[in-house]
Amino acid sequence: MKNILQKLLSKSRKAIQDFNLIQDGDKIAVGLSGGKDSMALLHILKSYQRFSPEKFELIAICLQMGGVDNSSLHELCKELDVELHEIPTDIKEVVFDIRKEKNPCSLCAKMRRGALNDHAVRLGCNKVALGHHKDDALETLLMSMFYEGRVSSFSPKSYLDRTGITVIRPMIYVEEYMIIKAAEEMNFKIVKNPCPADGNTKRQYIKELIVRMQDEMPDFKKNIFIALNNPEQAFLWDKEKISKVK
Ligand SMILES: Nc1ncnc2c1ncn2[C@@H]1O[C@H](COP(=O)(O)OP(=O)(O)OP(=O)(O)O)[C@@H](O)[C@H]1O
């Protein structure tokens, strides 16, 4: 196994254990978008499956966003011996042509999540694994504070009542630069993102802001991540509690 994959695997394994992400008998659908993150995730989970104490099944689901050539994903899944389901969708038409969304990213993400979970259920899965990593978590935390006035990020594991699916994010401890390195060293055949808003989003702005802050404060990312993992130390102004202080 490539050295870089081993490193990704060891970080993901720690997250799997810390948050109890995988159980015996799980059938997990990896959301395979064609980007580097979910490709890395598929490699990681396939390797983890070989020695994992929990026995679980793995499949991949790719939502076709319209006219995308996903042949490299079929090759990858064949190579890794993972069943791939490519599902046609009308998400692109709905978001851009019918709804003509000004802020397309949140509707698109919501529709992709819904479609992915529904198809996972249809294919007998109880879990969906997404390729979010540590930098995504930090960006989401800052975005929710700066744009929505909330202190929150996505969870490593969440149960969805509507479908009965548990969403897991095994790469939550993996930094993006390691995935980029893996993509280069392992020669990932990335599918070109068809999204017209690609790279021109609030997330991209926050990503660049984090790079600048990190340049000025060497512990910036490290400390935000510690804060995210430190619920006991969270102190938010709770009017009711504070007004009762003597
Ligand atoms: N078209 C799709 N088909 C299947 N799964 C998807 C699709 N788009 C997104 N996902 C899943 O949702 C996760 C988060 O989506 P997002 O658009 O934020 O991707 P990303 O951070 O650019 O990751 P990637 O590099 O895997 O595309 C992806 O890592 C993947 O697991």
Image: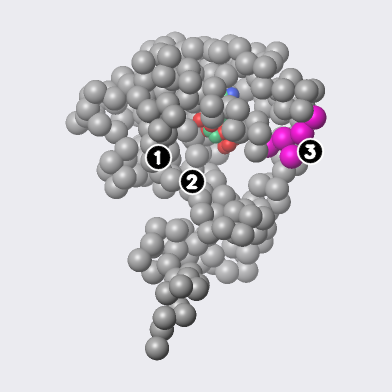
Q: Is residue 232 above or below residue 6?
A: below
Q: Is residue 88 above or below residue 6?
A: above
Q: Is residue 168 above or below residue 147?
A: above
User: x, y percentage for residue 181?
Assistant: 52, 39
Question: What residue sits 47% from the left and 25% below the top?
Answer: 117
Residue wearing tag 3? 102
The outermost residue toward the bottom is 246
Main secondary-structure element of the magenta-colored stretch: loop
Amino acid residing under circle 3: Lys
State yes or no: discs 3 and 1 in contact (Cβ < 8 Å): no
User: x, y percentage for residue 96?
Assistant: 77, 26
Q: Is mark 2 within 8 Å of ligand 1?
A: no
Quadrant of the image containing the C terminus: bottom left
Circle 2 residues within 10 Å: few <14, some 14–19, many ≥20? some
Residue wearing tag 1? 158
Provide the secondary structure element on which disc 1 rests: strand
Left or right: where does residue 234 sit relative to residue 62?
left
Disc number for residue 154: 2
Question: What residue sits 54% from the left and 27% below the top?
Answer: 114
Q: Is residue 162 above or below residue 179?
A: above
Displayed-image quarter of ligand 1: top right
Q: Nearer the viewer, residue 61 or 5?
A: 61
Which segment is the magenta one? 100-105
User: x, y percentage for residue 201?
Assistant: 72, 43
Amino acid residing under circle 1: Ser
Q: Nearer the viewer, residue 137 or 2?
A: 137
Q: Is 92 inside the magenta-drawn segment?
A: no
> Which picture quadrant has residue 53?
top left
> What is the C-alpha distance between the residues marked 1 and 2?
9 Å
Amino acid residing under circle 2: Phe
Question: What residue sits 67% from the left and 55% below the top?
Answer: 147
